[in-house]
């Protein structure tokens, strides 16, 4: 979506740093960041853009060969593509309402990069647990199927725009904030 913002604000220049790890935006001098999950740094000003949930998906071909899991325990019989940055790693904590089931999933691919795990899921390698924002286009296109749809992986969180606690944000940061809020209203761009 950044090219749309740059088109609307041709005088602005963006340096985008995509990282799966937590970056100290104050120490590293960032104007703003988008964070997914639960926020812990109270030195930041946060604007919640959307709710966030992690779901489980697999390709139709994988499910045809290995079957569709009906319960969280069934995941023990599957090759699970594991994201090492998950707060509960190596466990998958699955929530359904107030019910919690923790599963120690196994798999032949663990990575610190969600995009590489998504590519593996598309290539029929296993079941992926990741943010709905990452997999929604593939679900809509039929490339991935949402499995255990009543369950959510890990705790619920949000998608936030965060910025250093400064009294007077720059005009660019204010414009970026307003633009992002408009892009996420009334629903996030990946909603399905």
Image: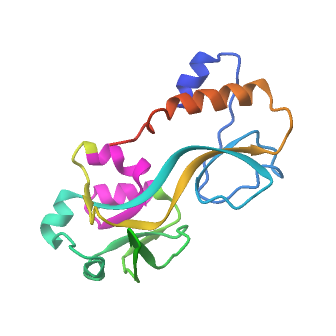
Residue 100 lies in magenta, yes or no? no
For this view, does 186 lie left or right of residue 70?
Answer: right
Magenta-colored span: 115-139
- The residue drawn where x is 65% and y is 29% is 176
Q: Give x and y (percent) for residue 179.
A: 59, 27
Give the quadrant of the C terminus: top left
Q: Give x and y (percent) for residue 184.
A: 50, 35
Residue 131 lies in magenta, yes or no? yes
For this view, does 58 lie left or right of residue 87?
Answer: left
125 lies above or below 103: above
For this view, does 124 lie left or right of residue 6?
Answer: left
Residue found at the far front of this picture:
98
- The residue drawn where x is 58% and y is 32% is 180
The quadrant where residue 137 appears:
top left
- The residue drawn where x is 65% and y is 32% is 177
The quadrant where residue 140 appears:
top left
Q: Give x and y (percent) for residue 125.
A: 29, 65
Main secondary structure along the magenta-highlighted residues: helix
């Amino acid at each position: 979506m950044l090219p749309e913002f740059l088109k609307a604000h041709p005088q602005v220049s963006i340096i985008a740093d995509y990282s799966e790890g937590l970056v100290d935006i104050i120490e590293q001098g960032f104007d703003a960041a988008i964070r997914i999950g639960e926020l812990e740094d109270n030195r930041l000003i946060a604007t919640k853009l959307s709710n966030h949930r992690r779901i489980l998906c697999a390709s139709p071909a994988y499910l045809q060969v290995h079957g569709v899991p009906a319960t969280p325990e069934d995941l023990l019989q599957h090759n699970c593509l594991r994201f090492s940055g998950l707060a509960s790693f190596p466990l998958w904590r699955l929530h359904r309402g107030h019910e919690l089931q923790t599963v120690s999933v196994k798999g032949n691919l663990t990575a610190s990069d969600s995009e590489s795990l998504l590519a593996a899921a598309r290539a029929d390698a296993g079941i992926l647990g990741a943010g709905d924002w990452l997999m929604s286009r593939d679900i809509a296109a039929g490339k991935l199927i949402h499995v255990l749809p009543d369950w959510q992986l890990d705790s619920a969180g949000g998608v936030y725009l965060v910025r250093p606690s400064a009294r007077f944000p720059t005009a660019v940061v204010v414009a970026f904030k307003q633009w992002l809020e408009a892009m996420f209203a009334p629903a996030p761009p990946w909603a399905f």
